Amino acid sequence: MRCLRVSAACALLLLWSRPGRGDASSPLEAMREAAEAAAEVDPERVPLPRLLLPPWLTRAALEQVRQEAVREAVRTEVEREWADRRRSPRPERVPPGHGGPPRGKDMSAQARSAAAQAQDVARNHDVARERGRGRPEHPLGPMRSQTEKVWGSP
Amino acid sequence: MGFTLVWQAVRLALLLPLLLLAPPTRGQVEGPQHELLRGVRAFRAERYEEALAIFRRLEAQGEVREIGFYVGTTLHKLGRHEEALGAFRAAARAGLREPVAAYYQALSCYRLGMLQRARLGFASLVQGEASPGPRLREGARRFLQHIEAALPGLPPGPRYAAVLAHAQAMLPGHEAIEWLEEAVLLLPYLPDRRVAAERVRALLERLPPGEDATALLRALDTGP
C-alpha cells in the first residue's frame, strides 16, 4: 500500500513538472508581459515628422517637390539659352556646304537635352490625361513611358 | 505465496493507469503551448525574426485561436505595421479582447499616420474601456496628448485624399481595409461628406472576399 502511495505521488509530481504546466504563466500571459515591457510609451522618442507628416505623405510630397524642381531647372535652362541667343548676334549665314551650324541645330548639347526632357514630361502628362485615370507620371519618367508604349500599360 | 502473487498483480494493475498518466518528459512531445512559449522567449530576447517564424508556423497550423496577437505584436516590433494591423484584425475576429493588443494596434496606426484611428484607440485605453497595466495606460495618455496637439495643424481634406489614394493602391489586397477605416473616421470632418462617403463605399465594394466590411458600411450609412 505504501508503495502505491509513493508511486501515485511520483506520478503527480511528474504531471505537474511537464513543460508549460509548471510555468508560472500561460503563453498568453507571458506574451502579454513581454509585449507590455517592450512597448513604446514615449511619443518624444518617435520622430516628430512622422507624426506631423505621416511617412506616405512625406514620400509623396518629396516626389512632387523633386518633379517640380526638375521642371523648373529645364525651364530655366531653356529660357537662359534663348536669352543668350537673343543677346548674341545671329551667326552669319554661309552657303550650305561651307561649314557653320546648320539652321535650327545651333542649340548647345545641354539645352537640347533639357528641351528633350521637358518634352518627355509634357508627353507623360498628356498620356496620363488621355487615359483619364489621373495617374501621376512615373518617377522613372521617359524610360517607363517608352516601355508602356511598346508593351501597353500593366 | 499465492496470495502474494495475486497482490502483486493487483498492485501492477493499479499502477498501470498512473504510469500511463505520467507526463511526457521535456522535449518528447512539443505541442502548440510549448512552441508558443519558445516564441515568447525569442520575443523577450528581441529575436523578433525567430519569434515571427515560430508564430507563423503555428498560425498556419490553425491551432491557436489568439495567434494574431502574437504575430501582430512581433510584426510591430519589426516595423511591419500594415501587416501587424491585419494580424490584430484577425485576432479580434477570433474573439480576442486584449488591451495590450489594442495598445499595439493604436501604436501601429500612429506610426503609419492613421491619426484618427490612433486617437480612437488610445482614447479607449485611457478611458478605461479596456484595462492595460499602468505603464501602457500612461503611454496611451501621452500619445493621445501628442495627437491632439498635432491634429489642428493637419487639415483633414488632404489627409483623406492621401488615405484614399493609399487604399486604392492596396486593392485588392487585404491591407486596404485598414486605410478605408481611417478614411471613414475622417468623413465627419469633410465639407462634402456625401461625395467622400460614396468614394469610400466604391472602394469597400472592391475588397477581396472574406474581408468583413460590414461595420464600415454601417458607419457610412449611419453617419451624420
Image (spheres, helix red, strand yellow):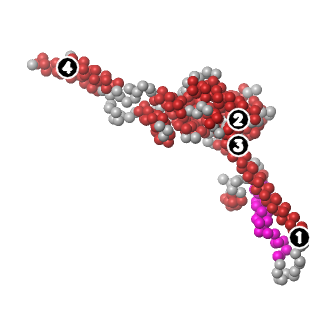
Query: Which residue is identified by label 3?
Result: A57
How far apart are the two marked residues, 2 and 3, measured between alpha carbons? 15 Å
Provide the secondary structure element on which disc 3 rests: helix
Query: Which residue is identified by label 1?
Result: A88
Discs 3/1, front: 1
- CA neighbours of label 4 inside 10 A, class few (<14), some (14 to 19), many (20+): few
Same chain under badges 3 and 1? The reply is yes
How far apart are the two marked residues, 3 and 4, measured between alpha carbons? 79 Å
For this view, does A141 lie left or right of residue B42?
right
Residue B23 location in percent, x, y? 32, 28
Provide the secondary structure element on which disc 1 rests: loop
Discs 1/4, front: 1
The residue at 56%/30% (across/down) is: B101
Residue A130's place in the image compared with B45, above or below, is: below
Residue B16 sits in quarter: top left
Q: What residue type is labelled 1?
A: Ser
Q: Which of marks 3 and 1 is nearer the N terminus?
A: 3
Chain identity of mark 4: B
How far apart are the two marked residues, 1 and 2, measured between alpha carbons? 58 Å
Q: Is-magenta flag for residue A113?
A: yes
- CA neighbours of label 1 inside 10 A, class few (<14), some (14 to 19), many (20+): few
Which stretch appears magenta?
A: A101-127
Residue B126 sits in quarter: top right
Q: What residue type is labelled 3?
A: Leu
Q: Nearer the viewer, residue B209 or B177?
A: B177
Callouts 3 and 1 close, C-beta under 8 Å: no
Discs 2/4, front: 2
How far apart are the two marked residues, 1 and 4, measured between alpha carbons? 121 Å
Query: Which residue is identified by label 4?
Result: B10
**Can residue B199 be seen here?**
no
Callouts 1 and 2 close, C-beta under 8 Å: no
Discs 2/3, front: 3
